[in-house]
Image (cartoon, grey):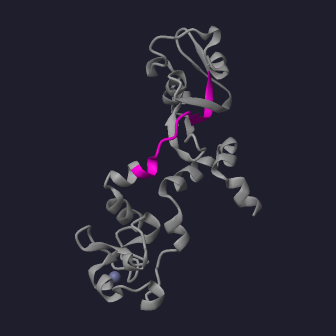
Amino acid sequence: MPQVCLALFPGGVAPSGLVRKESASLIIAQRKVLLLNASYEPLGLVSVPRALRMVWQRTAEVLEKDGDRVLRTVRFTFACPSVVRLHEYVNVRKRRRSAGGLRAKILIRDRYRCQYCNKRGTAADLTLDHIVPRSRGGQSVPENLCACCHDCNQRKGDRTPDEARMPLLSNPAALWHDLDLTALHHAAASRPEWRKYLYLDDAAAA
Ligand SMILES: [Zn+2]
């Protein structure tokens, strides 16, 4: 059994029904745990019980504990994890993109506004524009897609925003910035132990 399991489960005994929500202190159960891919890429936030289950099932390891916080069940006391890392790499990008929700996510990210003329529309009024056109090697990835009304889409045609003299209204950095990561950075304000995994210390030093 990995050392971390011994630390979490005194005596290495397998508790059945590991962490039951009803027996966990509500506050602890509501604390979030930063989940990292095997590559250390931040994947998102999970609950303490879920993180503990992943550790127990040996799909994840604990990298950081949440101070002295513990989760008590009827029979066991567990040190609360703050950061856990998957043992096996999960290709989330592929999964997220193949899930087919990309169009909806882009429209939400761009607040249903054409990123060239700022006109607001419904999902039916708006299309997705390849900022660098596909014919020029532009890919169908979030950072190269934006919400666009049909008029602007037609006007821009097969040109880059510069060529078409249609500057993007959104900050290009915002396009690069993963929505999920934005939420993580917000949450990290109260969790200094997450900073190094979100590369916030590097950003502050740069
Ligand atoms: Zn427009």
Task: Give the quadrant of ligand 1.
Answer: bottom left
Q: State the image quarter where residue 64 is shown.
A: top right
93 magenta-colored: yes
Residue in the image at 56% along x and 28% along y: 28
5 magenta-colored: no
The stretch in magenta equals 79-94
Whether residue 165 appears in this view of the structure is: no
Does 111 appear above or below 150?
above
Q: Nearer the viewer, residue 151 or 140?
A: 140
Whether residue 4 appears in this view of the structure is: yes
Residue in the image at 43% along x and 73% along y: 138
Q: Nearer the viewer, residue 32 or 91?
A: 91
Q: State the image quarter where residue 193 is shown.
A: top right
Residue in the image at 33% along x and 51% along y: 99
Which quadrant: the C terminus? bottom right
Q: Nearer the viewer, residue 50 or 55?
A: 55
Give the percent coordinates (x, y) of residue 134. Answer: 38, 75
Does 100 appear above or below 152?
above
Q: Nearer the viewer, residue 112 or 6?
A: 6
Does 145 appear above or below 95?
below
Which quadrant: the N terminus? top right
Give the percent coordinates (x, y) of residue 192. Answer: 69, 44
- Numbered marks: total: 0
Residue in the image at 70% along x and 60% along y: 203
